[in-house]
Amino acid sequence: MDAAHPSLELLRSLTDEHVLRALMRHRRLTRAELAAQIGISKPTAGESVRRLAERGLVADTGERTPGGRGRGRVGSYYALSGAAGTALAVSIAPQGVVGEIVDAYGETAARAERAVGRPAAPADVAAALSGVCEEITGSPGAPRLAVVSAADPVDRATGRLVHLPDAPFLVGELDPVAVLAPHVAGPVTVDNDVNWAARAEREHAGDDFAYLYLGEGLGCAVVADGEVVRGRNGLAGEIAHLVTVGPQGRAMPLIEAIGRLGVRLPGSTAIDAEALLAADRRAVAVAVAGVVAAIVALTDPGLVVIGGTWGPALLGAVDGAVSQLARAVPLKAAAVTNEPALTGARLAAVARLREAIVAL
Protein backbone atom coordinates (compact mmCIF):
# COMPACT_ATOMS: atom_id res chain seq x y z
CA MET A 1 0.00 0.00 0.00
CA ASP A 2 1.41 3.39 -1.00
CA ALA A 3 2.03 5.92 1.74
CA ALA A 4 -0.35 8.87 1.68
CA HIS A 5 1.10 12.01 0.12
CA PRO A 6 0.24 15.53 1.28
CA SER A 7 -2.22 17.31 -0.95
CA LEU A 8 -1.15 20.16 -3.23
CA GLU A 9 -3.33 22.52 -1.18
CA LEU A 10 -1.54 21.49 2.02
CA LEU A 11 1.88 21.97 0.44
CA ARG A 12 0.91 25.42 -0.78
CA SER A 13 -0.41 26.33 2.65
CA LEU A 14 2.82 25.23 4.33
CA THR A 15 4.90 27.14 1.80
CA ASP A 16 2.84 30.29 2.36
CA GLU A 17 3.32 29.92 6.12
CA HIS A 18 7.09 29.63 5.69
CA VAL A 19 7.14 32.70 3.45
CA LEU A 20 5.16 34.74 5.96
CA ARG A 21 7.39 33.69 8.85
CA ALA A 22 10.52 34.48 6.83
CA LEU A 23 9.20 37.97 6.10
CA MET A 24 8.39 38.43 9.80
CA ARG A 25 12.00 37.62 10.66
CA HIS A 26 13.70 39.64 7.91
CA ARG A 27 11.18 42.42 7.11
CA ARG A 28 11.84 42.39 3.36
CA LEU A 29 13.13 39.72 1.00
CA THR A 30 13.28 39.10 -2.72
CA ARG A 31 11.79 35.94 -4.16
CA ALA A 32 15.30 34.57 -4.60
CA GLU A 33 16.13 35.34 -0.98
CA LEU A 34 12.89 33.72 0.15
CA ALA A 35 13.75 30.59 -1.80
CA ALA A 36 17.19 30.44 -0.15
CA GLN A 37 15.82 31.13 3.33
CA ILE A 38 13.13 28.46 3.15
CA GLY A 39 14.89 25.91 0.97
CA ILE A 40 12.47 25.91 -1.94
CA SER A 41 12.80 26.70 -5.62
CA LYS A 42 12.55 30.26 -6.92
CA PRO A 43 9.39 29.49 -8.96
CA THR A 44 7.74 28.01 -5.84
CA ALA A 45 8.68 31.10 -3.85
CA GLY A 46 7.33 33.31 -6.62
CA GLU A 47 4.01 31.45 -6.69
CA SER A 48 3.67 31.77 -2.93
CA VAL A 49 4.36 35.51 -3.09
CA ARG A 50 1.73 35.85 -5.80
CA ARG A 51 -0.88 33.99 -3.71
CA LEU A 52 -0.13 35.99 -0.60
CA ALA A 53 -0.25 39.25 -2.54
CA GLU A 54 -3.68 38.31 -3.88
CA ARG A 55 -4.82 37.76 -0.30
CA GLY A 56 -3.48 41.18 0.68
CA LEU A 57 -0.87 39.83 3.11
CA VAL A 58 2.29 40.56 1.10
CA ALA A 59 3.15 43.62 -1.00
CA ASP A 60 5.89 44.81 -3.28
CA THR A 61 7.83 47.48 -1.35
CA GLY A 62 8.86 49.29 -4.52
CA GLU A 63 12.52 48.69 -3.67
CA ARG A 64 14.74 46.89 -6.16
CA THR A 65 18.06 45.08 -5.99
CA PRO A 66 20.94 46.49 -8.02
CA GLY A 67 20.89 44.52 -11.24
CA GLY A 68 21.75 44.70 -14.88
CA ARG A 69 25.13 45.24 -16.54
CA GLY A 70 26.32 41.75 -15.64
CA ARG A 71 24.97 41.75 -12.10
CA GLY A 72 21.95 39.56 -12.78
CA ARG A 73 18.27 40.35 -12.94
CA VAL A 74 16.75 43.12 -10.90
CA GLY A 75 14.85 41.67 -7.91
CA SER A 76 11.83 43.14 -6.18
CA TYR A 77 11.68 43.29 -2.39
CA TYR A 78 8.51 42.03 -0.71
CA ALA A 79 7.24 42.61 2.82
CA LEU A 80 4.12 42.12 4.87
CA SER A 81 1.40 44.50 3.78
CA GLY A 82 -0.46 46.89 6.03
CA ALA A 83 -3.49 44.62 5.71
CA ALA A 84 -1.67 41.98 7.80
CA GLY A 85 -2.85 44.02 10.75
CA THR A 86 -1.66 45.18 14.14
CA ALA A 87 -2.14 44.28 17.80
CA LEU A 88 -2.79 46.31 20.93
CA ALA A 89 -0.68 45.95 24.09
CA VAL A 90 -1.98 47.64 27.23
CA SER A 91 -0.69 48.21 30.75
CA ILE A 92 -3.09 49.17 33.55
CA ALA A 93 -0.99 50.23 36.54
CA PRO A 94 -0.88 52.76 39.40
CA GLN A 95 1.30 54.96 37.19
CA GLY A 96 -1.52 55.10 34.62
CA VAL A 97 -2.83 53.37 31.53
CA VAL A 98 -0.45 52.87 28.61
CA GLY A 99 -1.46 51.53 25.21
CA GLU A 100 0.70 50.62 22.24
CA ILE A 101 -0.11 49.57 18.70
CA VAL A 102 2.46 47.01 17.53
CA ASP A 103 3.03 45.32 14.19
CA ALA A 104 4.21 41.83 13.35
CA TYR A 105 7.83 42.98 13.42
CA GLY A 106 7.48 44.06 17.06
CA GLU A 107 7.68 47.75 16.19
CA THR A 108 5.52 50.23 18.10
CA ALA A 109 3.46 52.24 15.62
CA ALA A 110 1.63 54.38 18.19
CA ARG A 111 1.57 54.92 21.94
CA ALA A 112 -0.70 56.81 24.31
CA GLU A 113 -0.87 57.28 28.07
CA ARG A 114 -3.50 58.43 30.56
CA ALA A 115 -3.04 59.10 34.26
CA VAL A 116 -5.37 57.62 36.88
CA GLY A 117 -6.11 58.84 40.38
CA ARG A 118 -5.52 57.21 43.76
CA PRO A 119 -7.36 55.22 44.87
CA ALA A 120 -8.35 54.08 41.40
CA ALA A 121 -12.07 53.64 40.84
CA PRO A 122 -13.15 51.24 38.06
CA ALA A 123 -15.02 53.98 36.19
CA ASP A 124 -11.94 56.21 36.13
CA VAL A 125 -9.69 53.41 34.90
CA ALA A 126 -12.25 52.40 32.26
CA ALA A 127 -12.38 56.02 31.02
CA ALA A 128 -8.58 56.18 30.82
CA LEU A 129 -8.48 52.85 28.99
CA SER A 130 -11.09 54.02 26.47
CA GLY A 131 -9.27 57.31 25.98
CA VAL A 132 -5.99 55.57 25.21
CA CYS A 133 -7.68 53.28 22.68
CA GLU A 134 -9.54 56.11 20.97
CA GLU A 135 -6.26 57.94 20.49
CA ILE A 136 -4.26 55.13 18.90
CA THR A 137 -6.70 52.68 17.28
CA GLY A 138 -8.89 52.80 14.20
CA SER A 139 -6.37 53.86 11.56
CA PRO A 140 -5.75 52.14 9.22
CA GLY A 141 -7.97 49.60 10.95
CA ALA A 142 -8.84 48.18 14.34
CA PRO A 143 -6.14 46.02 15.97
CA ARG A 144 -6.73 42.34 15.34
CA LEU A 145 -6.26 41.44 19.01
CA ALA A 146 -5.27 42.88 22.37
CA VAL A 147 -3.14 41.76 25.31
CA VAL A 148 -3.68 43.50 28.64
CA SER A 149 -1.47 43.66 31.73
CA ALA A 150 -3.23 44.74 34.92
CA ALA A 151 -1.81 45.54 38.35
CA ASP A 152 -4.58 43.59 40.03
CA PRO A 153 -5.68 39.97 40.34
CA VAL A 154 -7.40 38.76 37.16
CA ASP A 155 -10.19 36.21 36.94
CA ARG A 156 -8.91 33.57 34.54
CA ALA A 157 -12.30 32.71 33.07
CA THR A 158 -13.61 36.22 32.39
CA GLY A 159 -10.58 38.52 32.30
CA ARG A 160 -12.20 40.77 34.91
CA LEU A 161 -10.01 42.53 37.46
CA VAL A 162 -10.84 41.31 40.98
CA HIS A 163 -10.44 43.37 44.13
CA LEU A 164 -8.86 41.44 47.00
CA PRO A 165 -8.18 42.62 50.58
CA ASP A 166 -5.10 44.88 50.77
CA ALA A 167 -4.89 45.19 46.96
CA PRO A 168 -3.23 48.61 46.66
CA PHE A 169 -4.47 49.75 43.27
CA LEU A 170 -7.96 49.26 41.87
CA VAL A 171 -10.83 49.56 44.33
CA GLY A 172 -13.59 47.45 42.81
CA GLU A 173 -13.90 45.36 39.67
CA LEU A 174 -13.16 46.23 36.05
CA ASP A 175 -13.88 44.35 32.82
CA PRO A 176 -11.12 45.26 30.31
CA VAL A 177 -12.54 42.84 27.75
CA ALA A 178 -15.81 44.77 27.60
CA VAL A 179 -14.07 48.15 27.58
CA LEU A 180 -11.80 47.15 24.69
CA ALA A 181 -14.44 45.32 22.62
CA PRO A 182 -15.41 48.41 20.55
CA HIS A 183 -11.78 49.10 19.72
CA VAL A 184 -10.43 45.64 18.86
CA ALA A 185 -11.50 43.32 16.06
CA GLY A 186 -10.56 40.07 17.79
CA PRO A 187 -9.79 38.44 21.14
CA VAL A 188 -8.67 40.32 24.26
CA THR A 189 -6.34 38.48 26.66
CA VAL A 190 -5.96 39.79 30.22
CA ASP A 191 -3.52 38.71 32.93
CA ASN A 192 -1.90 40.38 35.91
CA ASP A 193 1.25 42.43 35.63
CA VAL A 194 3.54 40.08 37.57
CA ASN A 195 2.73 37.19 35.25
CA TRP A 196 3.55 39.34 32.20
CA ALA A 197 6.77 40.58 33.82
CA ALA A 198 7.78 36.96 34.43
CA ARG A 199 7.13 36.11 30.78
CA ALA A 200 9.37 39.02 29.77
CA GLU A 201 12.08 37.57 32.01
CA ARG A 202 12.09 34.09 30.47
CA GLU A 203 14.89 34.82 28.01
CA HIS A 204 17.14 35.64 30.95
CA ALA A 205 15.90 33.21 33.61
CA GLY A 206 15.04 30.03 31.72
CA ASP A 207 11.97 27.81 31.95
CA ASP A 208 11.76 27.10 35.70
CA PHE A 209 11.88 30.06 38.05
CA ALA A 210 9.81 32.19 40.38
CA TYR A 211 9.42 35.93 39.87
CA LEU A 212 8.94 37.85 43.11
CA TYR A 213 7.56 41.37 42.68
CA LEU A 214 8.24 43.68 45.62
CA GLY A 215 6.90 47.17 45.05
CA GLU A 216 3.82 49.18 46.01
CA GLY A 217 2.06 45.85 45.82
CA LEU A 218 3.34 42.31 46.37
CA GLY A 219 3.12 39.48 43.89
CA CYS A 220 4.69 36.32 42.61
CA ALA A 221 4.66 34.37 39.36
CA VAL A 222 5.83 30.77 39.08
CA VAL A 223 7.15 29.67 35.69
CA ALA A 224 7.28 25.89 35.28
CA ASP A 225 8.40 24.24 32.04
CA GLY A 226 8.21 27.65 30.37
CA GLU A 227 4.60 28.35 31.35
CA VAL A 228 3.21 30.65 34.01
CA VAL A 229 1.20 28.74 36.61
CA ARG A 230 -2.03 30.74 36.89
CA GLY A 231 -4.17 28.53 39.14
CA ARG A 232 -7.77 27.49 38.59
CA ASN A 233 -9.15 31.00 39.07
CA GLY A 234 -6.10 32.89 37.87
CA LEU A 235 -5.14 33.95 41.40
CA ALA A 236 -1.91 31.97 41.86
CA GLY A 237 0.96 34.03 43.23
CA GLU A 238 -1.06 36.37 45.47
CA ILE A 239 1.50 36.35 48.28
CA ALA A 240 0.41 39.34 50.37
CA HIS A 241 -1.33 37.07 52.88
CA LEU A 242 1.20 34.24 52.82
CA VAL A 243 2.34 33.62 56.40
CA THR A 244 5.98 34.45 57.09
CA VAL A 245 8.26 35.66 59.91
CA GLY A 246 7.35 39.08 61.31
CA PRO A 247 8.71 41.28 64.10
CA GLN A 248 9.92 39.40 67.19
CA GLY A 249 9.85 36.21 65.16
CA ARG A 250 6.06 36.04 65.16
CA ALA A 251 4.19 34.29 62.36
CA MET A 252 2.01 36.70 60.37
CA PRO A 253 1.03 37.51 56.77
CA LEU A 254 3.73 39.18 54.69
CA ILE A 255 1.71 42.36 54.20
CA GLU A 256 1.21 42.65 57.98
CA ALA A 257 4.89 42.01 58.71
CA ILE A 258 5.85 44.83 56.34
CA GLY A 259 3.00 47.06 57.48
CA ARG A 260 4.19 46.92 61.09
CA LEU A 261 7.34 48.74 60.00
CA GLY A 262 5.22 51.82 59.28
CA VAL A 263 5.89 51.86 55.54
CA ARG A 264 2.39 52.12 54.13
CA LEU A 265 1.47 55.13 51.98
CA PRO A 266 -0.92 57.49 53.84
CA GLY A 267 -4.53 56.42 53.39
CA SER A 268 -3.54 53.42 51.31
CA THR A 269 -2.55 49.78 51.53
CA ALA A 270 0.29 50.46 49.08
CA ILE A 271 3.89 50.17 50.28
CA ASP A 272 6.06 53.29 50.33
CA ALA A 273 9.34 52.12 48.74
CA GLU A 274 11.36 55.05 50.06
CA ALA A 275 10.15 54.53 53.62
CA LEU A 276 10.73 50.78 53.41
CA LEU A 277 14.33 51.20 52.27
CA ALA A 278 14.91 53.46 55.28
CA ALA A 279 13.35 50.94 57.68
CA ASP A 280 14.83 47.82 59.29
CA ARG A 281 16.15 46.05 56.20
CA ARG A 282 17.00 42.92 58.15
CA ALA A 283 13.40 42.54 59.27
CA VAL A 284 12.16 42.98 55.71
CA ALA A 285 14.73 40.51 54.38
CA VAL A 286 13.71 37.85 56.93
CA ALA A 287 10.04 38.31 56.02
CA VAL A 288 10.78 37.99 52.30
CA ALA A 289 13.01 34.97 52.92
CA GLY A 290 10.07 33.26 54.62
CA VAL A 291 8.06 33.76 51.44
CA VAL A 292 10.94 32.37 49.36
CA ALA A 293 11.03 29.32 51.65
CA ALA A 294 7.35 28.67 50.93
CA ILE A 295 7.84 29.13 47.19
CA VAL A 296 10.77 26.70 47.19
CA ALA A 297 8.88 24.11 49.23
CA LEU A 298 5.84 24.20 46.96
CA THR A 299 7.27 24.78 43.48
CA ASP A 300 11.00 23.85 43.57
CA PRO A 301 12.21 26.61 41.21
CA GLY A 302 15.73 26.67 39.84
CA LEU A 303 15.97 30.40 40.48
CA VAL A 304 14.08 33.23 42.17
CA VAL A 305 14.07 36.55 40.30
CA ILE A 306 13.52 39.68 42.38
CA GLY A 307 11.79 42.59 40.68
CA GLY A 308 9.76 45.63 41.69
CA THR A 309 10.58 49.10 42.94
CA TRP A 310 12.35 48.09 46.17
CA GLY A 311 13.02 44.36 45.88
CA PRO A 312 16.29 44.54 43.88
CA ALA A 313 17.72 47.10 46.33
CA LEU A 314 17.39 44.53 49.13
CA LEU A 315 18.68 41.60 47.07
CA GLY A 316 21.87 41.23 49.14
CA ALA A 317 20.02 41.22 52.46
CA VAL A 318 17.36 38.81 51.19
CA ASP A 319 20.02 36.53 49.71
CA GLY A 320 21.78 36.43 53.07
CA ALA A 321 18.56 35.42 54.83
CA VAL A 322 17.69 32.86 52.15
CA SER A 323 21.14 31.27 52.44
CA GLN A 324 20.23 30.26 55.99
CA LEU A 325 17.19 28.28 54.86
CA ALA A 326 17.14 24.49 54.80
CA ARG A 327 16.58 24.64 51.04
CA ALA A 328 18.34 27.67 49.64
CA VAL A 329 17.87 28.80 46.03
CA PRO A 330 19.84 31.22 43.81
CA LEU A 331 18.48 34.77 43.68
CA LYS A 332 19.03 37.40 41.01
CA ALA A 333 17.67 40.84 40.20
CA ALA A 334 15.24 41.12 37.30
CA ALA A 335 16.97 41.76 33.97
CA VAL A 336 14.00 43.56 32.40
CA THR A 337 13.55 46.78 34.36
CA ASN A 338 11.93 49.18 31.86
CA GLU A 339 8.15 48.57 31.91
CA PRO A 340 8.57 44.80 32.46
CA ALA A 341 4.84 44.03 32.53
CA LEU A 342 4.13 45.99 29.35
CA THR A 343 7.18 44.36 27.76
CA GLY A 344 5.73 40.92 28.47
CA ALA A 345 2.32 41.94 27.15
CA ARG A 346 3.91 43.44 24.04
CA LEU A 347 5.90 40.26 23.32
CA ALA A 348 2.74 38.20 23.65
CA ALA A 349 0.78 40.57 21.42
CA VAL A 350 3.39 40.30 18.67
CA ALA A 351 3.55 36.50 18.94
CA ARG A 352 -0.24 36.17 18.80
CA LEU A 353 -0.48 38.60 15.90
CA ARG A 354 2.02 36.53 13.93
CA GLU A 355 0.02 33.37 14.57
CA ALA A 356 -3.17 35.14 13.51
CA ILE A 357 -1.55 36.31 10.26
CA VAL A 358 -0.28 32.82 9.45
CA ALA A 359 -3.74 31.38 10.15
CA LEU A 360 -5.47 33.66 7.62
Image: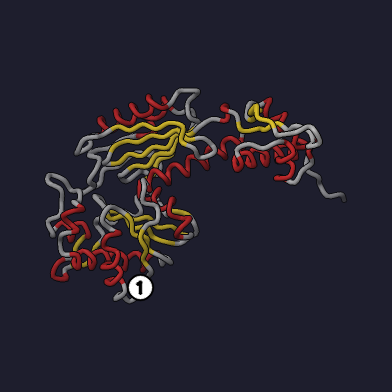
For this orientation, the residue located farthest to the right is 1
Nearer-the-camera pick, 139 or 207 = 139
Q: In this image, 143 relative to 11: left or right?
A: left
Kind of residue at badge 1 = Ala
Question: Which residue sits at x=44%, y=41%?
Answer: 346
> Do we see residue 44 in this rendering?
yes
SS state under label 1 = loop
Identify residue for label 1. 328
On the question of residue 48 being in view, the answer is: no
Examine the image and state in which quarter residue 313 appears: bottom left
Judge whether 188 appears above or below 210 on screen.
Answer: above
Relative side of 19 to 344, left or right: right
Give the percent coordinates (x, y) of residue 257: 18, 61
Q: In this view, does 252 lie to the left or right of 13?
A: left
Residue 163 horizontal/vertical position (percent):
26, 43
Q: Nearer the viewer, residue 170 or 86?
A: 86
Q: Where is residue 262 in the image (x, y as percent from the top left)?
A: 12, 56
Q: Which residue occupies the foreground of this view, 248 or 107?
A: 107
Q: Which residue is drawn at 24% across and 50% down?
A: 216
For the C terminus, which image quadrant? Answer: top right
Observer-nearest of 111 and 345:
111
